Image: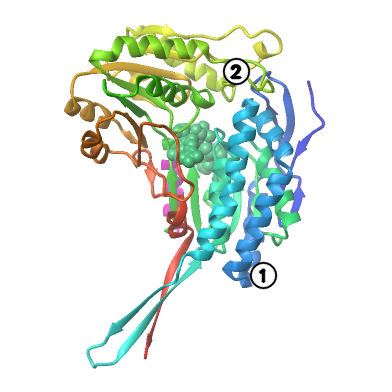
Amino acid sequence: MTTNRRILNFIDGRCVEGRGRWFEDINPADGEVVAEVSEATAADVDAAVSAAKRALAGPWGKLGVEERAALLHKVADGIMARLDDFVAAEMADTGKPLMPTRMGEIPRAAGQFRVFAEIGRVTPMEMFESAMPDGRRALNLVHRVPRGVVAAICPWNLPFMLLTWKVAPALICGNTVVVKPSEETPATAALLGEVMTAAGIPEGVYNVVHGFGPDSAGEFLTTHEGVDAITFTGETKTGEAIMRAAAVGTRGVSLELGGKNAGIVFADCDFAAAVAGETKAAFHNCGQICLGNERLYVERPIFERFVEALAEAARGLRMGDPMDKATQIGPLISRQHREKVLGYMEQARAAGAEVHAGGGIPALGDPFDRGAWIEPTLWTGMAEDAAAVREEIFGPCVHVAPFDDEDEVRALVNDSPYGLTATLWTRDLDRVHRLAPALEVGVVWVNDWMVRDLRTGFGGAKGSGIGREGGVHSLHFYSETRNVCIRT
Ligand code: NAD
Ligand code: 6OD
């Protein structure tokens, strides 16, 4: 099918056709083209960065934090008033099921504007009075000033939630932004432009440029000398390229990158809760979530029973029409990504994996057979150095291995180039206190998975990133302190 829907860049408060080519936005649930997207060239990116620079010196730059907070609340209201539009746009870009999109991701994205409005409003200014050697005193007033123009490079897996996690704190700190959404998921970033305008956010404060990474809008933006700081969420390899770009001009960079997260299940756990939690951790969003667990270590006495229960849960997950409220799992983001995941499935078999659930493409009938669906897959029996156990797959695949004691499992979990999250299932509180701080990750969940308060910091160790975003940690990245030391 061809479509009449066009998605344009959003520059200086206006929808603008880029000077690049048009590319297709495809719904991976059924392979339909849902929109044609206008690619931004280097000149278009330059126009967006220039607009963002001008906006810093305009009315936006004169607002106080209270006024910016009020505008952010209006943006949140605007998103929720158009909830149906945002849900439809996100579902069309990703094939995600209705319920998690409508009940979870889009309201959570709107919530970012409220949370950061309040965090910005209530975070006190630091002030220190110092005694000077001559007996007089000095008052240190620590101002928080915006960094300037922030480039936000976003991934496709939770498109709107991850984009707003950057835009909301950047704006409350007084920056202006140029966003480059993933080429796979341009729609909600574009819709947000309409909401920003309706909320009264001045022209040039929020800009969107569409396109790809290398030799396209992503690279043009991260290498633009007018950009003062870069926030990136995506693959570790891309993060390395972006860090190199940020080195020129010594710009600030925040990197939220990949993961190969582990779940650890002790024999004393609440068995049913651990099975249910790990079913989500392995297969939610079709495994396309940086927090997902692709490695699972289960204490030997319950290993076989756990594998059986998790395999049964995986086989029971409902796939199909994303509009059906009962659908739990959507497709992968694209056929191209499915090829990558299928490649790992082949490698897993070659590495001696026993397949307990899934392992292939489901037969869902027309029109979904034209999509990018794949079965939730559970393996056992691979060595720790197998590619499917060591590398991030970013699909609904989990390898389960037995362990015998705490030291062993700690070493297994930490033996990874990544360090984003870990999930611990046990009733032994002493063990939690011993083991959790010894895991080389940014977040440890205990007896649950993916319950993050928006006010808390998030980020990874090792190859999973640099810096923490979320809560007051975002203010540290999106602003700089300026100490004014006044002798009294
Ligand atoms: P990706 O790195 O392929 O792309 C992310 C964004 O970067 C896209 O907008 C892309 O166009 C752009 N890009 C690519 N190359 C670029 C370059 N050279 N210069 C500038 N921009 C460039 O990632 P993805 O496939 O969209 O997302 C999946 C990855 O993101 C997974 O590795 C996942 O673990 C990671 N992720 C991490 C977190 C986290 O918080 N740590 C959250 C979500 C996703
Ligand atoms: O919602 C969150 O708190 C969160 N950390 C989401 C990250 C998703 C990564 O893909």
Identify the colour scheme used.
rainbow
Numbered tag placed on residue 107 in the rendering: none
Q: N-terminal of the two: label 2 or label 1?
A: 1
Q: Which residue is mark 1?
A: 58
Q: Nearer the viewer, residue 116 or 411?
A: 116
Q: CA distance from mark 2 to mark 1?
A: 46 Å
Q: Amino acid at mark 2?
A: Ala
The N terminus: image quadrant? top right
Which structural element holds mark 2? loop
Above or below, 255 against 403 in this view is below
* Picture coordinates of residue 228, whole percent (x, y): 51, 59
User: Over which residues does the magenta segment extend?
Assistant: 238-249
Numbered tag placed on residue 372 in the rendering: 2
Res 392 → quadrant: top left
Q: Amino acid at mark 1?
A: Gly
Res 97 → quadrant: top right
* Picture coordinates of residue 303, whole percent (x, y): 29, 13
Q: Is residue 316 left or right of residue 204?
A: left
- Tell me which residue sits at (47%, 59%) in the image: 475
Figure label count: 2
* Picture coordinates of residue 258, whole percent (x, y): 42, 34
- Does the magenta stretch mainly form a helix, a strand or a loop? helix
Q: Is residue 7 left or right of residue 120?
A: right
- Tell me which residue sits at (77%, 37%) in the image: 6
Please check the rendered image and state whether residue 241 is part of the magenta-colored stretch, yes or no.
yes
Q: Nearer the viewer, residue 198 or 177?
A: 198
